[in-house]
């Protein structure tokens, strides 16, 4: 019985290893490549289409759109008091990322880079209870908006783990530091869709969009860094360090 179970395990392991060949859409980079920064940059570029749709066979989720299930912004009580819930926020545009200044340390598998997005559009539902300047806003409805000129510095650090006598890379949660140049948003149905008060309130909100952006930024940073870290780890879980960064 015991020997039988072990045999099955061994067969299973052999099978999994046999099937775990690196797929053609993952371009591997030699640890010794003097142009490794360029090589990894090209691998990521080459993965862009796959990331957009997701890679089911590696359980890599799609980055388009990015969904933020629930964001609760709470601030106050003085000056600008904000209580806003955003639900089912669909952010489109993550797949248009522009990568630059990528530096790779292949021995420690650490990466520093900058990611920018020209434009991230979002839509979802809002509930608001806020006092901004003299304006009191209470209500709920649909929300649409855009972040423009979005830029960030990123840092990814990893450690190596041994599994089945093989070395794998595991990334720690990516550090993300976002700058958002400009935000534009529109809350529909404010004051029950009043044609004068609604647009006027949106104007005040947009004139003070820094307030909202400051609040939403950490949530977006967290969501994007969780997503990108998860994607990187799904790939490095499936293949060994030697397979992804061969030593020749
Ligand atoms: C937002 O949701 C929280 C519970 O998650 C609730 O306590 C709060 O009142 C909500 N805010 C608004 C403006 O509806
Ligand atoms: C682990 O790998 C090393 C070198 O590749 C080998 O010498 C050793 O026997 C392996 N151990 C097991 C338990 O497979």
Image: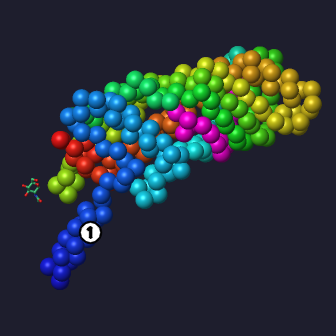
State the quadrant of the C terminus: top left
**Name of the residue lying farthest toward the right:** 195
Counting from the top left corner in percent of width and height, residue 99 is at: 46, 29
> Ligand 2: which quarter?
bottom left
Q: Nearer the viewer, residue 62 or 89?
A: 62
Asked whether 87 falls inside the magenta stretch, the response is: yes
Residue in the image at 92% along x and 26% along y: 196
Counting from the top left corner in percent of width and height, residue 208 is at: 71, 18
Counting from the top left corner in percent of width and height, residue 237 is at: 32, 51
- Based on the displayed image, in which of its 4 quarters is residue 146 positioned? top right
Q: Residue 83: tell me if it is visible.
A: no
Residue in the image at 39% along x and 36% along y: 42
Q: Please report the bounds of the magenta region as a residue range.
A: 81-97
As displayed, is residue 12 above or below residue 202? below
Residue in the image at 77% along x and 31% along y: 186
Total numbered badges shown on the rendered structure: 1
- Based on the displayed image, in which of its 4 quarters is residue 145 positioned? top right
State the quadrant of the N terminus: bottom left
Residue in the image at 54% along x and 21% along y: 179
Describe residue 106's horizontal placement relative to residue 81 as left or right: left
As displayed, is residue 68 above or below residue 19? above
Q: Nearer the viewer, residue 206 or 167?
A: 167
Describe residue 44's horizontal placement relative to residue 205 as left or right: left
- Residue at the disc numbered 1: 15
As displayed, is residue 15 above or below residue 46? below
Q: Colour mode? A: rainbow
Q: Residue 25: tell me if it is visible.
A: yes
Q: Secondary structure at mark 1?
A: helix
Q: Nearer the viewer, residue 198 or 16?
A: 16
**Magenta span main SS:** strand
């Amino acid at each position: 019985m015991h020997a039988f179970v072990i045999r099955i395990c061994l067969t299973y392991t052999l099978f999994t290893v046999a099937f775990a060949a690196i797929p053609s859409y993952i371009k591997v980079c030699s640890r010794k490549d003097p142009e490794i920064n360029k090589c990894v940059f090209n691998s990521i570029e080459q993965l862009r289409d796959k990331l957009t749709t997701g890679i089911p066979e590696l359980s890599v989720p799609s980055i388009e759109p990015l969904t933020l299930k629930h964001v609760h912004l709470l601030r106050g009580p003085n000056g600008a008091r904000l209580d806003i819930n955003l639900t089912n926020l669909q952010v489109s545009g993550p797949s248009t990322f522009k990568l630059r200044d990528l530096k790779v340390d292949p021995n420690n598998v650490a990466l520093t880079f900058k990611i920018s997005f020209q434009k991230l559009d979002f839509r979802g539902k809002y509930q608001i209870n806020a006092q901004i300047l003299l304006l009191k806003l209470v209500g709920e409805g649909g929300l649409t908006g855009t972040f423009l000129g979005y830029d960030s510095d990123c840092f990814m650090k990893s450690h190596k783990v041994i599994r089945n006598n093989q070395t794998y890379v595991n990334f720690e949660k990516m550090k993300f530091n976002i700058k958002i140049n400009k935000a534009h948003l529109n809350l529909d149905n404010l004051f029950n869709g009043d044609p004068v008060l609604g647009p006027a309130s949106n104007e005040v909100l947009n004139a003070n969009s820094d307030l909202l952006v400051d609040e939403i930024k950490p949530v977006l940073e967290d969501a994007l860094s969780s997503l990108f870290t998860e994607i990187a780890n799904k790939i490095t879980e499936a293949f060994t360090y030697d397979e992804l960064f061969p030593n020749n």
